[in-house]
Amino acid sequence: MTTEGGKSFARRDRLLEIEATVRTWWTEKDIFNAESCEKPPEQGEKFFGNFPFPYMNGFLHLGHAFSLSKLEFAAAYHRLRGANVLLPFAFHCTGMPIKASADKLAREIQRFGDPPAFPSEEENQVNQEAETKDQNASEPAMKDKFKGKKSKAASKSGGQMYQWEIMRSLGLSDGEISKFQDPYNWLSFFPPLAMDDLKAFGLGCDWRRSFITTEMNPFFDSFVRWQMRKLKSMGKIVKDLRYTIYSPLDGQPCADHDRATGEGVQPQDYTLIKMEVISPFPPKMGVLEGKRVFLAAATLRPETMYGQTNAWVLPDGKYGAFEINDTDVFIIAQRAALNLAYQRFSKIPEKPTCLVELTGYDLIGLPLKSPLSFNEIIYALPMLTILMDKGTGIVTSVPSDAPDDYMALHDLKAKPGLREKFGVKDDWVLPFEIVPIINIPEFGDKAAEKVCKDMKIKSQNEKDKLAEAKQKTYLKGFTEGTMLVGEFAGMKVQEAKPLIKSMLIETGQAILYSEPEKRVMSRSGDECVVALTDQWYITYGESEWKKLAEECLSNMNLYSDETRHGFEHTLSWLNQWACSRSFGLGTRIPWDEQFLVESLSDSTIYMAYYTIAHLLHKNDMYGSSSLMKPEQMTDEVWDFVFCGGPYPQSSDIPSSALNQMKQEFEYWYPFDLRVSGKDLIQNHLTFTIYNHTAIMAKRHWPRGFRCNGHLMLNSEKMSKSTGNFKTLRQSIEEFSADATRFSLADAGDGVDDANFVSETANAAILRLTKELSWMEEVLDAESSLRTGLPSTYADRVFANEMNFAVKLTEQNYQECMFREALKTGFYDLQAARDEYRLSCGTGGMNRDLLWRFMDVQTRLIAPICPHYAEYVWRVILKKDGFVVKAGWPLSESPDLTLKSANKYLQDSIVLMRKLLQKQIFGSKKANKGAPVTSLTEEKLRGLIYVNEQYDGWKAECLRILQNKYNRTTCSFAPDGEIMAALKQSSIGQASDFKKIQKLCMPFLKFKKDEAITLGVQALDLKLPFGEIEVLQENLDLIRRQLGLEEVEVLSATDPNAQSAAGNLVSLLQQNPPSPGNPTAIFLAR
């Protein structure tokens, strides 16, 4: 027995022992191996589910396990109900993270030795600065601006973290770590460990079909090469110049999976307006004499350039004068210069050259000649709200249509002190008036001025109001505005905008500029730019292909509206995707082998590869122990297997093997479910749809995606740096596999973030082991159980609760609502068992019902806690076969009336207990708690008064509500209509109507609310069962629950019954019974 700090882990250890034993049973019989059949499966006969293969640069953690558990539970449910289930699993090694980490490790060993002797913290700071200086040696050293960026690990830990230290944190010894300089050692080391962890987790996987990516598995390498050639032959891969997010340090595009932060961020395109500085230049800019110098402003609204009154700069902003070519110099922020350098706008490609460092103060007052402006000369003026990490740091000013510009110019004009503070001369500001350029319905031709005045904006510092004003004017200006000036006057803004943009660029007055929408950090630790790269692209977004993707999506089961909206949004913007890389691991582009296929492009149809992987390389994920040769897998063979191509006559693969591969694919495809985190909607999952519609026949398109949120750990974000992190292996060792799975099921089902609670896992250990003990005790004392057919009211209720559990849990599993399945199939079922045990009293529990309960509960929990269920099935219940394939439990149709009757009974007992306490100890309103009557004798008699049907004014109110209830919309007519009906009824004709009306109003409201919540049956005049009959049948239970000597049930409508209450009849009058609410009075016997 394991103990730690005085705490016993015997229960946990028992589960771990059970799990080890059960896995041996499964392995001996290859219980999870899936075989196809010659006959195509009927609907529901097979289930093929899969999961995005995890990246193999470390151990699997609970976040992986959470998403995977959704697939595992779904597959286990379908296996349990008798479907032929395929759940395969593979390991992703493509991309740059492994190669980058291996190279980093090699540099550390070269620099600090093997094992490395790292410098102290102080020395480390010096080394970091030196390294940063080396990296930026060819870049301008502008003060406080150009500092080396920390790596992801360093950023998370608050300081530099060496790769060697990261490997140590994974539990590796110094002797092992140096081997990881070879990136292929990662591929040999981590996938087998991940497989071991998943086996310990109880994953119902056909491990024969496992594989790794990259050329290390030559069969998968051949598969990806075929896929890429096929896409290219269809015109869906092209080579072109495109803007793409790019890592300068890695020297290649940085796709979503290559990023530490900024996943999903796209390039943002601008028009860069060249505002020429008129010479002579101020002394600080003297070095620029003889060159054409421009303040370069990035704008999204080139059509508004006619209305420029000035330019804006940030006084404290740091700028530089950067050489664009031999003649032109742009004054911009260094970050923008770096982006331009990668877009072929730098004298030295990819290396911005700064001729002089400047601040915004140096630029204030510069005279400018700006394209399209009706003002021949405008000036650079100060604006305090400019963001230096957006655009170029230079901003055009169009106060007619931009609320920010209007208010900033207004402030400078209205506040001499503000002008004096920044050295702004009056003639730079005061002569410049608003230039009307666009007419917008409702806002006129000076939209910014009108909106600012309407919203009572007083200053450029009212950021929230200005943001709202900007939203109003920009959207309406674009969609409804009309140009008033220029050669496109009279044209709609949305038509004129692209024409004006093209004119500015063609005449050399502007250039195209792009930068990341938000900050993006690569996994190598540097800030990404947008580069104009000549590379291979997949043409996502092409109109005809997009229509096919939308058609596929429309027929898929996505399990939530939010997920569907996410896909629809992604399809609306997704465009060409760079599919080639020059650095990392993976498959070579077959026609251009200097490039690799990037990590999101080799993983779009590999689900098809699962169907035949075991025939290519049985039980060897690396493909080295193969049944045939990789070179035999020609394009003709792949086409025959996956695309309905002709039989490959030239192939030397035996026809039996070829036909077996085709049979496997045709049987298992399409896949029924792919489970993933919702973050993959914007890339991988949408790519999967696109590629299937391009390559596969329509009958093989995906059937379902289920997306979930991220997993928190004990209500906090999982993070290695804070220590709030747990690997899958750690969780299994701490809680056991089944308790981990139990807590994962309980963590949540929606697309919002879920929460793994350690206390839930600990509670699961206790619940499962206590349940084992209870079942063992029941069977040990089986002879004492009541035999024969179930006959009592408690028997019927318990059997009915099991019927409900079977039906509801089946529905929850089908809908992938596993938290609900855990509730209905375990928590609720246990509560029903506990209630049954209590209800049976001296008569005892029925043997057959308890056997059924143990059978049903074991099957229902099997998808979530399979080791526990298997042990119960074979060892405790001594049943044949395996519970994981035992079949869904049979049940009769649940009886809603009986369930309602039992709820009535249980609620009534709770109500009567309160009435008893109140009668013994007195109401809270009684003086000093004086009792209503003295009940000191131990032996008490209970009188339960029941009124089974509404009558009088209540009955009339219910009839009115029944007539005014719309069963289609589940809503009531307006209150006025209900009141009119009440006045016209017999109640309304009564002389004391006003008095009765005061009673009717709250009753009507109560019943309306109840009907909306519970349904129209709440308006019935009586309950669907006999209240007296239910109570009479359970007098023994009531007596035991309330500690009474005797109980009698009486009808409140029986005049003689009231006399039985004696001098307590006033209690009956104060609290008269009504349908569903009996009243109890207690007397000394």
Image (cartoon, helix red, strand yellow):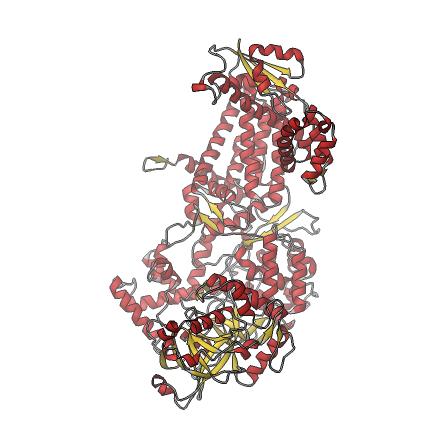
- For the point 65% across and 77% down, which residue is it? 490
- Number of numbered discs present? 0
Residue 479: quadrant of the picture: bottom right
Residue 732 makes an appearance in the image: yes
Residue that protrudes farthest toward the top in the picture? 1085
Q: Is residue 743 above or below residue 437?
A: above
The residue nearer to you, when weighing 341 against 764, is 341
Quarter containing the N terminus: top left
Horizontal and vertical percent position of residue 939: 50, 10
Percent position of residue 926, x then y? 47, 20
Residue 704 vs residue 147, the one in the foreground: 147
Q: In the figure, 980 relative to 217: above or below?
A: above
Q: Position of residue 191 (x, y in %)?
A: 46, 56
Q: Is residue 900 above or below residue 602?
A: above
Q: Position of residue 675 (x, y in %)?
A: 56, 52
**In the image, 467: left or right of 289?**
right
Is residue 596 visible to us here?
no
